[in-house]
Amino acid sequence: MKQTLKLTDIIAVGFMLFAFFLGAGNIIFPPLAGQLAGESLIPAMTGFLLTAVGLPLITIVAIAVAGGSWEHLTKDLPKRAAMIMAVLIFIIIGPAFAAPRTGLVAYEMAVKPFFVDAAQSHLTIFSIAFFAIAMFFAWSQGKLIDVIGKVLTPVLFVGLIVLALAVFVDPQGEVLAAHGEYLTHPLQKGFLEGYNTMDTFGSLMFGVLIVDALRKKGITEQSATSKYLIAAGCIAAAGLTFVYVSLFYLGATSASVAAGADNGGVVLSLYVQSLFGPYGQIVLSVIVLLACLTTAIGLISACSDYFCSLTLLSYKQWVVINGIACATVANVGLSQLIALSVPVLFALYPVAIALVALTFIRTKLPNPQAAYRVVILVALMFALIDAAKVAGIDVSAFNMLPLFEVGMGWLLPTAAAMICMCFIGSRQNEELTEETV
């Protein structure tokens, strides 16, 4: 029997994935980039979209191609190595950084401006309430599509459409000259800025969460699962592109209302207040709160789903554990979280990209198991050097590496290893091994 979803369910799945991706970080980075890019808006925005939209979409497709699960994606790696990689990624996007950041940014941009003298107690109370609500929505795992895709995301999207239309209809200034690196190589600079969203990590885990949600809707066949997973990815990518384009243009026309701003949050806040007057902060608060909440729900659910598969604790018990951990870490402070997590992200991000790339060339590899081990190891080794540099360790001996100065010293060695492994190994030996097993 052919398994199908109604159009409304397909759109809901796509909206659900879009909401998972669209956290506060995705809203904050583009405005400042747009302001600095100025007249170089188009190439800078193109570079940003390649990494902030293109890479996550390709990752979703890779999950579908591999079979729809993390286990399928990493089947050629040693089980322990695959598990360690998954645990580290889930810790980073879960209770250690990304999930607590949603609560912190929601407080800083949506709640704190309404207090004349904001105190630490306000953050504590808000973080407890915020993650309690996120835990409530994540509690019923099978209802995520209905709750997020059909309720929360449409409200969020309406807010973003209102903001986007206002930006294009009534821009608050002229597009000025580009600044810094955007003046000399805007495409490359925009490409590197796109990494800040860290959505490729999210794709690895959200894709699996979408597969689980599809199964709850009766979609179990591999072909049907892949089709709807890719459809969801395309809908999410279209939504992200819409948001990024409007926010880049917002930033490019913000010089007169947000001159000298040192972060995208300030640019966005001042611009919205200029557009909507006294009600601007309310509009921004609704958008940021919904964006942060939907992402927090997705992160807590994805982490809980994975950790319950490794332990004797149930999904709901892990929801409570992750929610409490997120609320606790959110009180540490955003700058401390970033300082601790950035080196880890630099070490793991190239590994994730290499894993995705290998998925698409797996059928061309004479010996997939050997290739996966070698390429992932090379990516990790050179990524650790980049991570050491970010952490402040002197690694100037590696300055001769191409792209090392921009934090991508891992790229060419990993690509070279991948090309070499296309010619090393024996397909015949692999087939004989499989027959023996």
Image (spheres, helix red, strand yellow):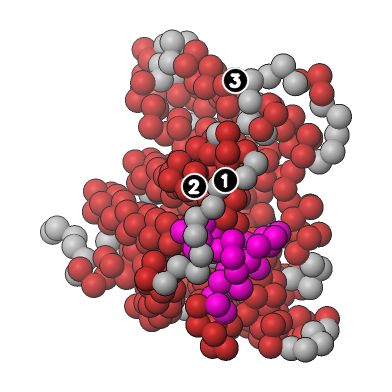
Q: Is residue 257 magenta?
A: yes
User: On the rendered structure, is 326 left or right of 178?
Assistant: right
Badge 2 marks a residue whose secondary structure is: helix
Residue 205 visible? The answer is no
Which sits earlier in the primary sequence, circle 3 or circle 2? 2
Q: Are marks 1 and 2 in contact (CB under 8 Å)?
A: yes
Viewer-proximal residue among 35 and 392: 35
- Quote the CA–CA distance across marks 1 and 3: 33 Å
In which quadrant of the rendered image does the C terminus lie?
A: top left
Residue count near mark 3 (Cα–Cα under 10 Å), binned few <14, some 14–19, many ≥20: some
Examine the rendered structure and indicate whether residue 333 appears above or below residue 390.
below
Residue 66, image x and y in percent? 38, 40
In front: mark 1 or mark 3?
Answer: 1
The residue tagged 2 is 39
- Quote the CA–CA distance across marks 3 and 2: 35 Å
Badge 3 marks a residue whose secondary structure is: helix
The residue tagged 1 is 178
In which quadrant of the rendered image does the N terminus lie?
A: bottom left
- Quote the CA–CA distance across marks 1 and 2: 6 Å
User: On the rendered structure, is 285 left or right of 212?
Assistant: right
User: On the rendered structure, is 171 left or right of 376?
Assistant: left
In front: mark 3 or mark 2?
Answer: 2
Q: Which residues are magenta?
A: 247-274
Viewer-proximal residue among 322 and 261: 261
Q: What residue lies at 58% left-to-right and 33% top-to-bottom?
A: 184
Q: Amino acid at mark 3?
A: Pro
Q: What residue lies at 52% left-to-right and 22% top-to-bottom?
A: 415
Residue 45, image x and y in percent? 47, 47
Q: What residue lies at 74% left-to-right and 37% top-to-bottom?
A: 387
Which sits earlier in the primary sequence, circle 1 or circle 2? 2
Examine the rendered structure and indicate whether residue 211 appears above or below residue 387.
below
Which sits earlier in the primary sequence, circle 1 or circle 3? 1
